[in-house]
């Protein structure tokens, strides 16, 4: 191990280095150096199977080395270890003054042991700051760094990685920090647990997610794969932040990470909702959008019926927790000033402005209707009915999977409708929605039929139009609807 060393004449060296940098700052060549550093750019996204070999080559190939550092620092390090000439170079060769200053600071920094946040700061300086410096000059990404701190809810705190790096609102790099070296495997395990679900709304065609685990000064780079979400694949050996070569390896990893993220962003959807954005509705509802879940908060002054219905809604969410076709509660609902429930998964909205380009084929429409009917089967089995089946209350999770949301509108199946207890009739109800004043299974099915009459959908054909009419006339049971010929071409 090569320990960090500063010669006794450090103040003299620093003064000499500072003077040279001030003189060279006007002709700083960092921009040109960064462009050369990132060449050749990746032209295609690497396959997940090829990622480990990319990281191995990043550590052993000479493409990114040597890194510029102040001339005096370079000479002092070379005197200690002649091999340093393969890792470092005097900045006077490249003129990359800003890059040199950052590398110099990283190599000289004293990293004491400390809390997880202290550890996090050390990783940020070694990797995140380097990526942000690259982006300052290359401008290929608009990186945003979020640290998991200050969260009131313990449940939410346990769901979020310690580090989230966002590109175009999507999580493309994450990490976990621990204080003791013996906790490294625990940090790796938590990478699999936190924000592990893939969301097409954010990730589009991204097939792997790079991440790191850090414990007591040891850093391990890992990868999560969409096709194997329960495994965490190690793509590099452990690197120590306490020796110079370990730090240099992490700088090289930061450069490779930047190159991979730059090409991965081409796989992201163009219309992703920004992470942590808040959607507000006139009904008093606020939806905070996270990577794989949302936080729904409702002003009970605007929707006071939720207070009386809280126990009923808690029973509903518990009874339908296992459904693959209904939105599910991760926490709540409960009321503390506001009605609050944490829901998953998050998907693409199917409101009127999105419908035509998110359901683009008859097969996709048929898949959506099948999912809605399966959702009603789960809901009706729990003795509840939805009452507000409209496209804005359906989300698209992928091309073949849709979920029914907004369960706060649900009522006991077969109940006598009461404005005092249930509120006014829902938007879009027709004269025959209720059967003798009661909301029945057929009432939900009639609303499904109405979905098929919305403009902007693919043509239904004769069979589809007949199916919609039968649903709206309440002439089909749920099981008959599920087995209808139109759904099984």
Image (spheres, rainbow, N blue to C red):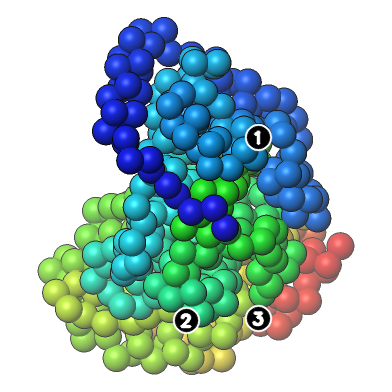
Which is more N-terminal, label 1 or label 2?
A: 1
Q: Distance between the residues labelled 2 and 1?
A: 70 Å
Is residue 446 in view?
Answer: no
Q: In which quarter of the image is residue 259?
A: top right
Q: Residue 172 carries which label?
A: none
- Write down the residue under mark 1: 86
The quarter of the displayed image where residue 220 is located? bottom right
Residue in view at x 58 percent, y 42 percent: 81
Q: Which label was assigned to residue 385?
A: 2
Using the rendered image of the protein, determine whether residue 109 is visible from the camera's viewpoint: yes
Q: Which residue is at the front of the view, 279 or 390?
A: 279
The image position of residue 248, as x and y in percent, is 55, 44
Dot 3 surroundings within 10 Å: few (below 14), some, or many (20 or more)?
many
What SS does tag 3 mark? helix
| SS at circle 1 | helix
Nearer to us in this view, 161 or 422: 161
């Amino acid at each position: 191990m090569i320990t960090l060393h500063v010669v006794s004449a450090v103040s003299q060296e620093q003064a000499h280095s500072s003077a040279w940098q001030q003189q060279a700052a006007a002709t700083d060549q960092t921009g040109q150096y960064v462009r050369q550093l990132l060449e050749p750019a990746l032209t295609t996204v690497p396959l997940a199977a090829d990622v480990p070999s990319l990281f191995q080559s990043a550590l052993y190939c000479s493409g990114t080395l040597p890194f510029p550092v102040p001339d005096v620092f370079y000479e002092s390090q070379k005197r200690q270890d002649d091999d340093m000439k393969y890792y470092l170079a005097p900045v006077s060769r490249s003129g990359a003054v800003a890059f040199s200053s950052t590398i110099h600071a990283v190599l000289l920094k004293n990293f004491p042991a400390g809390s997880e946040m202290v550890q996090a700061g050390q990783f940020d300086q070694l990797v995140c700051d380097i990526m942000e410096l690259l982006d300052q000059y290359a401008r290929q990404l608009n990186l945003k760094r979020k640290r998991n701190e200050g969260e009131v809810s313990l449940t939410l705190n346990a769901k979020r990685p310690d580090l989230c790096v966002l590109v175009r609102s999507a999580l493309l790099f994450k990490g976990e920090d621990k204080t003791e070296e013996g906790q490294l495997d625990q940090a790796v395990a938590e990478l699999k647990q936190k924000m592990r679900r893939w969301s097409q709304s954010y990730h589009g065609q991204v097939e792997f997610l790079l991440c790191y685990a850090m414990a007591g000064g040891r850093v391990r780079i890992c990868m999560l794969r969409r096709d194997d979400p329960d495994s965490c694949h190690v793509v590099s050996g452990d690197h120590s932040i306490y020796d110079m070569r370990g730090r240099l390896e992490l700088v090289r990893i930061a450069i490779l990470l930047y190159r991979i993220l730059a090409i991965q962003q081409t796989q992201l959807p163009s219309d992703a909702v920004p992470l942590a954005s808040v959607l507000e509705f006139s009904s008093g509802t606020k939806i905070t959008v996270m990577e794989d879940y949302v936080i729904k908060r409702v002003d009970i002054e605007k929707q006071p019926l939720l207070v009386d219905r809280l126990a009923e809604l808690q029973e509903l969410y518990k009874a339908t927790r296992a459904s693959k076709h209904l939105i599910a509660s991760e926490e709540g609902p409960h009321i503390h000033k506001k009605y609050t429930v944490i829901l998953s998964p998050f998907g693409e909205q199917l409101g009127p402005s999105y419908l035509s380009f998110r359901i683009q084929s008859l097969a996709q429409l048929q898949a959506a209707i099948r999912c809605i009917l399966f959702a009603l089967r789960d809901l009706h089995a729990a003795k509840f009915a939805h009452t507000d089946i409209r496209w804005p209350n359906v989300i698209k999770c992928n091309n073949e999977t849709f979920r029914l949301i907004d369960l706060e509108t649900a009522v006991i199946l077969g109940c006598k409708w009461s404005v005092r207890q249930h509120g006014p009739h829902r938007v879009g109800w027709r004269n025959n929605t209720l059967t003798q004043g009661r909301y029945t299974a057929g009432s939900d099915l009639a609303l499904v039929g109405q979905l098929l009459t919305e403009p902007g959908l693919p043509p239904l054909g004769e069979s589809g139009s007949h199916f919609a009419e039968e649903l709206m006339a309440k002439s089909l049971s749920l099981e008959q609807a599920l087995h209808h010929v139109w759904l099984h071409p």
